[in-house]
Image (tube, rainbow, N blue to C red):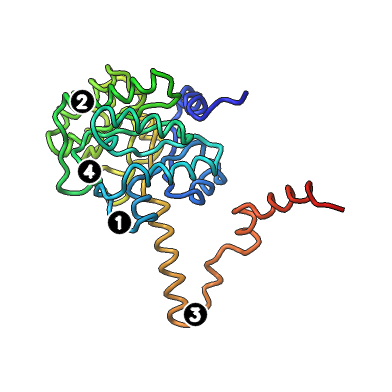
Amino acid sequence: MKPGPAARLRALLADNRLLVMPCCFDALSARLIEAAGFGVTFMSGFAVAAARLSLPDTGLMCYAEALDQGRSICQAVRIPVIGDADTGYGNAINVKRTVQGYAAAGFAGVMIEDQVWPKRCGHTLGKAVVERAEAIARIQAAVDARNEGQDILIVARTDARGTHGLGEAIARAEAFAAAGADILFIEAPASVDEMATLCRAVPGRHLANMLEGGRTPILPLQQLQELGFALAAYPLTLLSAAVRAMQDALADLGHGRDPSARLMPFDELRRLVGFQAYEEEEKRYRQG
């Protein structure tokens, strides 16, 4: 029997090499990440809310919508996928149900955060976090769901750096680790020194969020590994690239220019979405 998504992610983490995670927003972007040779991806809540609903990442996308998008992503690729599950969509019991649903959908990992609901992008103004005890209870519930039979890794995120300072964020990360979280994510450290401090202060696997234009410095991969990070997520790189490419193609069309020089060849696009594999499989059942 082939190892499941969580087992494959654990094996990648066991190599102790930085895992680079371009973030996906639909099945096609996930397949492109896999085809480019990356070993893991992350379903970005910001990117999914934008691509699926054309709405901001402010809690407007519900659990069912995120789960539905995630199921399609997980079915499209063989590499492990970590899914953004916001705050878990309710109290501790809701968190457990969310973890169970994400595991059943095929996710290798699930991220739970400590913002109040409705949450918002971690690099924007106006966010707030729940009290530390409630934040710990959410992660404990997620860990309990994992320990009760869900084969999935728990990514514990805190946004307290932006609201209470780095010290409180580190204290929460320590508590999340003690509760049994598999991966720790202190969102939006504001300097390289802060990034180094949080990795030194809390033993465990840390995730760095490399958001272009955000509050955290964008660092070379080698430096991220040297600082102590285990994973580097690029949440909006592909979405931003796709939007710019579509705008450029639309501008060409709007000005009467031929956009074909910008485009993927039709045969390559057909192969990417599976026409060639479909046609080969179809031959097996052709009559006569």
Residue 179 coordinates in the image, percent (x, y): 28, 18
* Quadrant assignment, res 227: top left
* Mark 1 vs mark 3, CA separation in Å: 31 Å
Q: Mark 1 points at which residue?
A: 55
Q: Earlier in the sequence, mark 2 or mark 3?
A: 2
* On screen, residue 232 above or below 275: above
Instruction: Say what amino acid the circle numbered 2 marks.
Output: Arg
Q: In this view, does 213 lie to the left or right of 249?
A: left
The local secondary structure at tag 1 comes to loop
Q: Choose mark 3 or mark 4, whichever is in front.
A: 4
* Mark 3 vs mark 4, CA separation in Å: 42 Å
Q: Name the residue under label 3.
A: 257
Residue 173 coordinates in the image, percent (x, y): 24, 25
Q: Choose mark 1 or mark 2, whichever is in front.
A: 1
Q: Earlier in the sequence, mark 2 or mark 4?
A: 4
Q: In this view, does 50 lie to the left or right of 87?
A: right
Contact check, label 1 and label 3, Cβ < 8 Å: no
Q: Name the residue under label 2.
A: 172
Residue 277 coordinates in the image, percent (x, y): 69, 49
Q: Earlier in the sequence, mark 3 or mark 4?
A: 4
**Label 4 packing within 10 angstroms: few (<14), some (14-19), many (20+):** many
